[in-house]
Image (cartoon, helix red, strand yellow):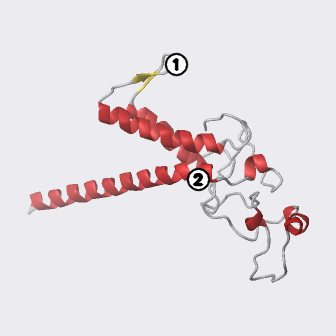
Amino acid sequence: MLYIRQWNNMQYVTNAAFLLSTYADYLAEAGVGTVTCAGGETAGAGEVAALARAQVDYVLGTNPRGVSYLVGYGAKYPARVHHRAASIVPYKHSKQFIGCSQGFEHWFGRRSSNPNVLVGAIVGGPDRRDRFRDNRDNYMQTEACTYNTAPMVGMFAKLNRMAREERERRAATARSGTAAEV
């Protein structure tokens, strides 16, 4: 995982993945063989795209903890997201008025999982040593932000398109192989 800073590092990971993927597309379309990095190493479009994909895979659970930082995805994901609506009891279960301070007083400090799973949110993620403390009060790591999730929507769309194109290519190859046998 790319690491920039402890407070919500996933904003950098997800945005870098999107930008790296876009840059890899540009390199391929422009016919640029390789680019030279600041340290003198070179990388081609395929390597840049692979780095982008590795960041996506890390977010989705291919990491030392085996945790998906995309809430609701996979078997293990953050259960105590720092998010008011996710952490207080749903209105359908308790029709009581909930004021601003009541959310903090009654639900914020609970150790149990959030009663509302914030499916699709990407939290701040682990520290530089891949440690992650899944507690609501650990807002640096458990707060969900739109600027974490938005670039991943673009990445997921691209990965979906690539998978569809690969399926279509394989189907066309299979059809042409079958036609040649007839």
User: Mark 1 and mark 2: span between their CA atoms?
Assistant: 29 Å
In the rendered image, residue 135, in percent from the top left (x then y), is placed at: 81, 55
Residue at coordinates 73% horizontally, 61% vertically from top-left? 79
Residue 113 point in image, percent of width and height: 78, 65
Q: Horizontally, is 134 left or right of 178 in the view?
A: right
Quadrant of the frame with the N terminus: top right
Q: Quadrant of residue 74?
A: bottom right
Q: Pointer 1: what residue?
A: 38
Residue type marked 2: Thr
Decide which of tag 1 and tag 2 comes sooner along the chain.
1
Which quarter of the rendered picture does the C terminus lie within?
Answer: bottom left
Residue 61 is at least partly visible in this image: no
Residue pictured at 43% horizontal, 33% vertical: 47
The image shows residue 62, relative to residue 30, as above or below, that is below
Residue named by callout 2: 149
For mark 2, give the secondary structure.
Answer: helix
The answer to whether residue 166 is seen in the rendering is yes
Residue at 27% in and 55% down: 170
Residue placed most toward the observer, 173 or 68: 68
Residue 171 located left or right of residue 156: left
